[in-house]
Amino acid sequence: MNNRPIGIFDSGVGGTSVWREINKMMPLENTIYLADSINAPYGEKSQNEILQLSIKNTELLIAKKCKLIVVACNTATTNAIAYLRQHYDIQFIGIEPAIKPAALYSKSRKVGVLATKGTLASSLFHSTSENHAAGIEIFEQEGKGLVTLIEQGDARANFTKQILLKYLKPMLEQGIDYLVLGCTHYPYLIPVLEEILPKHVVIIDSGKAVAKQTKAILNRYNLINTKNASKNHQFFTNSNVEILKSFLVPEQQQSQIKYLSF
Ligand code: DGL
């Protein structure tokens, strides 16, 4: 049982930022990662479409005998995890924008959130903001187009930087001191964000917190893999294998990265 893989899915390559934290924290675990890149971006879809795609990914990971599923996508978590938890007999770990720590540590009491339209529109996002950021001004910005650019391998392109400058200018003018990355694709924008943001603005994402929570749940259900001689990481994409590989340097040496129609 404990040797079974952790299943992870995202609308595309972004969830590899979460996979990396999981692998760092639990190097003995086997994993299966699904990049549903053919259907990216999820953030532009209706809640029902996001739900149907999340069901499809979940059923594939269950068929592949995963012991737990990490929904490594804020958009899928905020729109579908409640349904998934109700309908499938497996533990799910979700990811949500890290509003809570940002609200806790912000000195200016002003926090920016960059996320997809689907996440910003969800009721889960709003209840989290209300519950954990009372007295904090939240400046929301939809990252329109960013997921597509990252999926194309253009995270560091100059035009991506120009779009980010335009998106972040209003919240910077308002005096934010924390920027919450509410999409698992966005950590790949950090090199460009560091060029744009003033030094005192802290960038925060939820990857490490998800890895910690995954470990806690595996422990609670006695599912931790304690001895693994032959690590096995399988990555599947229903789009461009080379792009997915480019997000997995240097881990690709020890992984199988394949095309799969799903
Ligand atoms: N990585 C997904 C997230 O965390 C991107 C969503 C999308 O495909 O728009 O929200």
Image (cartoon, rainbow, N blue to C red):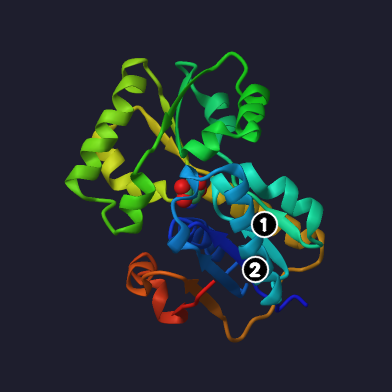
Q: How many neighbours does mark 1 have within 10 angstroms: few (below 14), some (14-19), or many (20 or more)? A: many
Whether residue 80 is visible, yes or no, is yes
**Which of the two discs, 2 and 1, sits closer to the camera?**
2
- Residue pointed to by mark 1: 214
Looking at the image, residue 158 sits to the left or right of residue 166; the answer is left
Looking at the image, residue 84 sits to the left or right of residue 148; the answer is right
Tell me which residue sits at (57%, 25%) in the image.
Answer: 104
Give how far across and how far down residue 255 sits, in percent.
47, 79
Q: Secondary structure at mark 2?
A: strand
Looking at the image, residue 157 sits to the left or right of residue 112; the answer is left
Q: Residue furthest bottom?
A: 230
Q: Where on the picture, by quarter, is residue 165?
A: top left
Tell me which residue sits at (32%, 30%) in the image.
Answer: 167
Tell me which residue sits at (64%, 26%) in the image.
Answer: 132
Q: CA distance from mark 2 to mark 1?
A: 9 Å
Residue type beneath disc 1: Thr
- Residue pointed to by mark 2: 6
Whether residue 226 is visible, yes or no, is no
Give how far across and how far down residue 109 sits, in percent.
49, 16
Task: Classify the position of the C terminus by image quarter.
Answer: bottom right
Q: Are marks 2 and 1 in contact (CB under 8 Å)?
A: yes
Give how far across and how far down residue 113 sits, in percent.
46, 31
Give how far across and how far down residue 92 sits, in percent.
71, 56
Sequence-wise first label, 2 or 1: 2
Residue type beneath disc 2: Ile
